[in-house]
Image (spheres, rainbow, N blue to C red):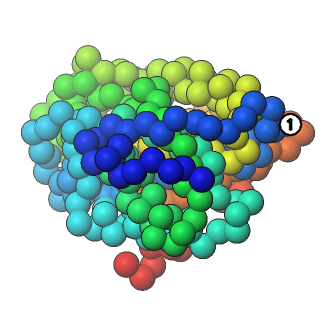
Amino acid sequence: MRTDDESAWGQGVFEAPCAHPENSGAVELLYAVRHGQSTANAAYAANTFIEADDSTIGLTDLGERQAAATGRWFAARDSDQLPDLVLCSPYLRAVQTSQLLEQELRAAGRDLPCHHIDQRLYDRHRGRLSTLSPIVVRERYPEESAKEARDPLGYRPPDGESFRDVADRLRGVVADLAADQRHRRVLIVAHDAVVLFLRQLLENLTEAEISAISEDGLAGNASITSWERHAGGYRLLAYDQRTHLSQI
């Protein structure tokens, strides 16, 4: 159980050194949680936008409640299902989600995981189109909207990155998970694009399969996606699970 005090929290970036021994086994259970609703998500839903550095966008009141509800879901798990490591995006909304999740674990008297900010888990960088909704992009930058429609996975916004770029940086994360001999259950707290392309890499999905999943809907705020290890890699247990959010 982690014994550091709360002074490591609250500044947007946190680390909890790992005390788990080597050779404790491979990662058997993997969770991915999308951050709770952010101020940009709320603006996006209203077809407006906010002027802000994407990395500094925080949670709304609803997002905080969503993150707490996710923490209570984990706090209710059996010990052999609790994460012993959290890998978190460096973006503020993901860090805040992790903070609130851990508060619920602490309140329930559960063992706390070690934590690591992984710089590879940031949201897809949309460059000059960051925080703009599709409607706003179509109105202001119709040529960029047309380029994206022609190649959704390969399109790079001005000064931004494509979805294929996201998948490329996540390959290192997946390789590190495969080599991890300290942790059995890992929780990743990040973004919808990260969850989607973790699915591609962990489940060996084609781009056509990933596109179909995306068209059906990306992982919602504070949703839980989970996989378990099996002989061929990882098997999906649940995607975009939101039942824990029904009563907030």
Q: Does any portion of residue 72 appear in the rendered image?
A: yes
Q: Position of residue 50 (x, y in %)?
A: 12, 45
Residue 101 occupies which quadrant of the picture? bottom left
Q: Number of marks in the image? A: 1
Q: Is residue 183 left or right of residue 17?
A: right
Label 1 element class: loop
- Residue 60's place in the image compared with 4, above or below, is below
Residue 233 image position (x, y, % from top left): 80, 37
Residue at position x 26%, y 17% from top? 159
Look at the picture and state if 1 lies above or below 133: below
Q: Nearer the viewer, residue 235 or 187?
A: 187
Of residues 177 and 225, the one drawn nearer to the viewer in this rendering: 177
Q: Nearer the viewer, residue 84 or 151?
A: 84
Identity of the residue drawn at 54% across and 69% down: 109
- What residue is pinned by disc 1? 232
Residue occupying the point 43% across, 36% down: 15
Farthest residue, direction top: 159
Where the C terminus falls, by quadrant?
bottom left
What amino acid is labelled 1 in the image? Gly
Q: Quadrant of residue 174?
A: top right
Question: Residue lying furthest bottom in this view?
Answer: 247
> Which residue is at a point 10% across and 39% down the rendered structure image?
51
Q: Residues within 10 Å of mark 1 (few under 14, many from 20)?
A: few
Q: Position of residue 241 (x, y in %)?
A: 56, 64
Residue extending furthest left? Answer: 51
Residue 142 seen from this side: no
Residue 110 is situated, as x and y percent measured from the top left of the image, at: 57, 65
